[in-house]
Amino acid sequence: MAIQWFPGHMTKARRQIEAKLKLIDVVIELLDSRLPLSSRNPMIDDILRDKPRLIILNKADLADPEATRKWLAYFKAEGHTAFPVDASTGTGIKEIPEQVKILLKEKIDRQIARGMNPRAMRALIVGIPNVGKSTLINKMAGRHIAAVGDRPGVTKGQQWIKTGGNLELLDTPGILWPKFEDQEVGYRLAVTGAIKEEILNIEEIAFYAVKYLVTDYGSRFQERFGIDKLPEDLSNPDEIVAVLEAVGRKRGCLISGGRVDLEKASRTLLHELRAGKLGRFTLETP
Ligand code: G4P
């Protein structure tokens, strides 16, 4: 796999987040509902330590609802508060300030006991690239927030975004990295489009898409692409490639001699998958 995260990048990202942690009361950890573990930073517990944390399974509109239920139970068993959100439409975001208030109850009660007027709760959104951090910030703010990097040469101090419900967000999210050492993690992310295709082999991504999806969503594959026989042995690469070829034939992705253009078939499959044409799916279960 051609993706590299150098230790230097990670150290820098980590320091940036640690500096922001000092300013906030709570962290909103954003994961992709379709792959909650693969979209999770492996060192997150170590980075956040005992900072109160809310886990949000974003893009819930794209994920398999049954799998999302299992993931919510998984995070609950881990001792976390977690719930699903669709940041693109805003479904579920009302829950955020309410849950933060519950998490910070002791702190707020202490302020009240001291006769203080509880100040706004302050949160930082963290997550890997493409998980929906900007979308969520904009949705919670009710307007488009320009990221610092959008205006070259302009540096500004920390900006707090009011979101209602006495919750303020830091305007720049904390960017984390996924666990690239594990190539399956990389491919799962690539199947969802979280990793740009230029740096990965499209046929390999499609190969993994078939491998991951045939097990749980095989009948949808069969229906959509008119596939007679699904692979019986997913450890046999030939059987997976046969599915890709069937997709190519169905979609007319052919080259001279009537052979299947595997690259074109792969693009077509991934495009249809990401556009939701094969329905909602989750790529990993707890
Ligand atoms: P980031 O800041 O964490 O890097 O992610 P960003 O908000 O840019 O979101 C990445 C992509 O994911 C965007 O799509 C965004 O619209 C989409 N997205 C974010 N949250 C959700 C969600 O809950 N559901 C769905 N279905 N999509 C979501 P894009 O194709 O890159 O851009 P665009 O189509 O919005 O222009």
Image (tube, rainbow, N blue to C red):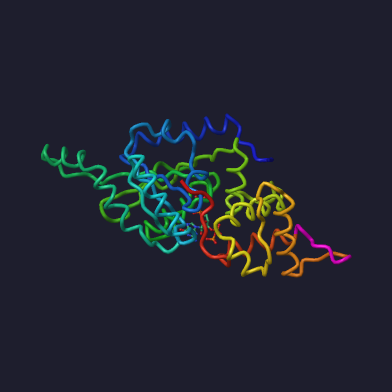
Residue drawn at 89 percent across, 65 percent down: 257
The quarter holding residue 182 reads top right
- Nearest the eye: 159 or 37: 37
Residue extending farthest front? 232
Q: Is residue 199 left or right of residue 191?
A: right
The quarter in which the N terminus is drawn is top right
Q: Is residue 234 left or right of residue 101?
A: right
Visible residue check, residue 159: no
Q: Is residue 40 on the magenta stretch?
A: no
215 vs 242, left or right, is: left
The structure residue drawn at horizontal position 72% and vertical position 69%, both measured from the top left corner, is 251
Q: Nearer the viewer, residue 82 or 239?
A: 239
- Rendering coords of residue 234 (x, y %): 65, 50
Which residue is located at x 68 percent, y 63 percent?
229
Q: What segment carries the magenta color?
A: 257-263
Q: Is residue 122 among what the camera can see?
A: yes
